[in-house]
Amino acid sequence: MSERFRTLFGATVASALALTVATGAQAETWKYSLEEAIDEVQGVYATKFKEHIEANSDHTIEIFPFGTLGESNDTTELAQMGAIHFATASPGFTGSLIPELQVFLLPYVLPEDHQVLADFYQTSDTINEMLAAKYEEKSLHLLDMYPEGEVVMTTKEPVTGPADLDGVKFRVMTSPMLIETYDAFGATPTPLPWGEVYGALQTNIIQGQENPMFFVESTKMYEVTDYITYAGHNTFTTAVVANKGFYDGLSEDEQALVAEAADVAYNHIIDYTKGLTERSEEKILEAKPSMNVTVLDDEQREPFREAAEQVKEAFVEEVGGDAQAVLDGFREDIEESKERVEGN
């Protein structure tokens, strides 16, 4: 979508929704957009959030699933404008808005252990203070961040090391760090809008893509690829944001209710995603028994880990600003989460 069309689209939708930041706090219905379908992880989180708000106030939540209000960049802009109150805004899409958020796309940075991840997102000062402040500068208030599941590669040929990705056109989001990652992994990174991915795989314009397993299953990416590879390189992260003007205009009680709803939804989604990858894999193999699933061992992952180091260096060099501080903060916060989890 062109910048000009996106601006016109956003202005038209904002007008149609007939909401402003000034009146948002008094609105009986709060609008919440997703980057996924209502029955996928973001929809499960939003539904729990909605249930808590509606059970404890006179407000209602209207959820807009993916595509209803445009692409992910569009809905983030609508949240900034105050045309909608809440939005999921995954760092892969908001990295152009807040460059330091691309840290979530760096390979082999986030912990693989589900409990450590859950603790990290909740307790990290780097996320909840340093990065949260950067959202505020962009007219957004960070409510929550949570993991959706381990990212897997789906390809047309087997992948056991970077050499197997040589010449493979691999779809990535339009993020410099994802482009850096798959370039370092040996592939030819190919940015494409999500709506074009299935067809591009079907016609062999591209030969690979990455996503959490539940999304591979729900979007039927397995129909147009033959191999799934667990390389352990990342977990898909989602942020939940509110329009800053709207949030600041809420009463203390309403802000507390929103925070409480986010906590309830967070705990729910952490439980929901336990075993989700395995359940999704079972559904894929049931639908397509010929699908090949490979879990790379430590020795096979080592070349990918080595390649990841140059991606981290590129992140610090290209992003600048607080990139090094964010990366260092992640390392410290993750170590603290590991110690807490291991101590329980």
Image: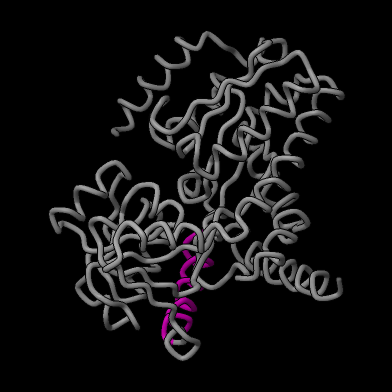
Q: How many marks?
A: 0
Q: Residue furthest left?
A: 203
Relative depth, front residue between 36 and 178? 36
Q: Is residue 172 above or below residue 156?
A: above
Q: Is residue 224 above or below residue 141?
A: below
**Residue at horizontal 36 percent and vertical 75 percent from the top:** 184
Q: Residue furthest bottom?
A: 299
Q: Is residue 172 above or below residue 115?
A: above
**314 falls in the magenta region:** yes
Q: Is residue 37 above or below residue 9?
A: below
Left or right: where does residue 106 sit relative to residue 142?
left
Residue 36 position, x and y percent, is: 46, 39
Left or right: where does residue 22 sit relative to residue 173?
right
**Residue at horizontal 68 percent and vertical 33 percent from the top:** 49
Q: Which residues are magenta?
A: 303-320
| Residue 289 quadrant | bottom left
Left or right: where does residue 266 sit relative to residue 294?
right
Residue 338 position, x and y percent, is: 76, 73
- Classified by dominant secondary structure, the portion drawn in magenta counts as helix
Residue 83 position, x and y percent, is: 54, 19
**114 falls in the magenta region:** no
Q: Quadrant of the N terminus?
A: top left
**Residue at horizontal 31 percent and vertical 78 percent from the top:** 159
Relative depth, front residue between 85 and 231? 231
**Residue at horizontal 55 percent and vertical 57 percent from the top:** 276
Q: Quadrant of the C terminus?
A: bottom right
